Amino acid sequence: MLNQDSLAQLKGLKTQMEAEKERAEAVVKGTQARYGFAVLDDGREIFIPPDEMLKAFPDDRVQVCIRPAKDNKTVADIEKLLDSPLTDFTGRCVRKGKAFFVQPDLPQLKRWLFIPPHARNGVKEGDYVRCAILRHPIRDGKPQAKILAVLGNDDTPGIENLYCMAKYHLASEWSQSAKKDLDTCLEQASPLTGDKRTDLTALEFISIDAAKTQDIDDALYAEVSNDGWTLYVAIADPTAYITPDSQLHRDVAARGTSVYFHGDILPMLPEALSQDTCALSEGVDRPALVCRIAVSDSGEVGEAEFLVASVRSRAKLSYYAVDRYLNGQADELMSHASPLEALYQVYRALRARRETQELVMEDRQEFRWVLDDNKQIDHIEPYEKLLSQKLVEECMVATNRCAARFLAEHKVSGPFVRHAGFRADRLEETRKFLAMHAPEVAELDPTTRSGYRNIMRALAAGGSDLPLRAMVNRLLTRAELGTEPGLHMGMALECYTNCTSPLRKYVDFLVHLKIKAVVLGEEIAPDEQTDLGQLREQLANARNATNEAERWLASRYLQRLETAEPGRTYQATVAHINSSGFNVRLNDNGLEGFVDLRKDPEKFSYDKWTASLTSTTRRFQLEQSVEVRFSGSDEEAGYLSQFVIVEGCGLKPPKPAKA
């Protein structure tokens, strides 16, 4: 037995060890490995060993005990769960023996979660599922999950879309409160009555859209004036039916946009509004916000007036039919010749002005995916943007410009679409790039509208062996939403916004609300729906969902082609390049994927000034033609297609023999 002195020493040692421990609250940070880190409120990151990581999920808020370990390091033991933000998530059912598990589709959670028999909900091995945590692992490191819904399996038509909708939490149903609000507004709203609307039903508006489009949100009319034309752009007015304080409005704001998948659509508005009551359908009177624009002979967008009006579309014309008419290939639209001819002249003037005075995005080869009955890609066909599509686009750009100018003149807090051009943190690099490759514009100020415009024109003009316009993309910022007007460098405009698609985009819906309030002399009430930061996140989330579904569909299509013709090769173009490898775009179908050169036996050196990767024997350059072979897809990278370079591709030319 230990004597009193030994017991006292042990007690003292225990007291000392306890004194050396620290308890704190922390957020669990996962890694690709089994261990993790406890991120304390003071910013410290303490190592969590694998056994302790079994007791928590990434992003859990926990109480940890920080204790000394070997080599003067500290580790964190998880003692108590304070909060777990992990709610429902998606994954795939896997089986081991008779036990069923879900493999979560979460970036930092790689462990399988056991599904007890009573929580399986009819799931089968290989099913894609939506789940929730049934039992947290804090006590014994053994979590359990329950199946909320079985989404389908690899043979389910449209599983890519269904899964991505669930993964990114995109709403596919309307709340009961929103449905009730919808019924009320359809029953009680009568926006065509009263004296607040200007009657423009006598004007011969026409809509030009895809043949199958039902949510028609714009109609056009133009007539000759003394010094050019008067362009009328009528935009559907859903704000006439949706009251700002309704649950329907809050649900619309939460969606933020209509989400277009290949083969499926999640509309921003209930279809009773977007495809019926508000759509500018042929032959019926509809409430609209109309922009009346003076367009000069030289294509300058002059004075503009916004009218809260009622309109009647005379016809719904397809892009294809209008294109044939404009190209002199058909005369079946002669009954609409007057507005079509005037609109065509307006388009030519507006387009010519933008091409000479501003910036126009270069046309790129477009591709159309044709799906089969299982919503898989049957084939992909190239197509060129039609003249009729460019006509409509030019009218929309003019209207959006006028909307931004209207908001700015009346000191209304947006939303505006701003594009700063070159990144502020890359201006020195930009100047060095221009000095190296385009010295004729190196002295221009890239932060001004005229400087940026002239720089981009010079880079796009050619004359260099390098693809300068494509190379400079890495130095550019993205367009963003803001409450104050600002330059849109990408279009070389003083200010810009979007207002022509209020049936599909909440930004446009908000702009409508504010323009109408000014026109009608009403107070613009600030509301929680105008949180642009939250709206940006919603739009990015929807974009991520559609991008992942597209990559998944594309990878399955490429895999079918590979199965039918093993070793098939593709001609492609280097679309983006970095130190790890490069993205390619296949010439025949526009599909994209990644060539990972980190796995190549040769070591490549990346040169950002020439946008190239070079090894001892090979060199790859931005916009270079290459030959590749499909090698699979990376599910953890959102089904990004992977390619490998065909042997002999990219070889440097042999050095000339010495004399």
Image (cartoon, grey):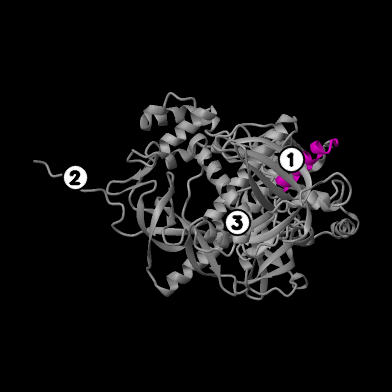
- Tell me if 83 is positioned left or right of 545 in this view: right
Q: Nearer the viewer, residue 6 or 357?
A: 357
What residue is at 41 percent from the left and 38 percent from the top?
608
| 1 or 2: mark nearer the eye | 1
Q: Which residue is mark 1?
A: 306
Q: Within 10 Å of the Cα at label 1, are there few (<14), some (14-19), or many (20+) other Cα atoms?
A: many
Count of numbered marks: 3
Query: Which element is circle 1 on?
Result: strand
Query: Is 124 located above or below residue 624 in the figure?
Result: below
- For the record, the magenta segment spans 506-523
Q: Is residue 512 magenta?
A: yes
CB contact under 8 Å: marks 3 and 2: no
Residue type at numbered disc 1: Phe
Q: Position of residue 517 (x, y in %)?
A: 81, 39
| 3 or 2: mark nearer the eye | 3
Q: Which residue is mark 3?
A: 337
- Tell me if 313 is positioned left or right of 606 in this view: right
Q: Within 10 Å of the Cα at label 3, are there few (<14), some (14-19), or many (20+) other Cα atoms?
A: some
Query: Which element is circle 3 on?
Result: helix
Q: Which mark is residue 655?
A: 2
Q: Position of residue 461 (x, y in %)?
A: 39, 38
- Tell me if 512 is positioned left or right of 383 in this view: right
In three-dimensional space, the C-alpha distance between marks 3 and 2, rounded to whole angstroms, equals: 64 Å
Q: Within 10 Å of the Cα at label 2, are there few (<14), some (14-19), or many (20+) other Cα atoms?
A: few
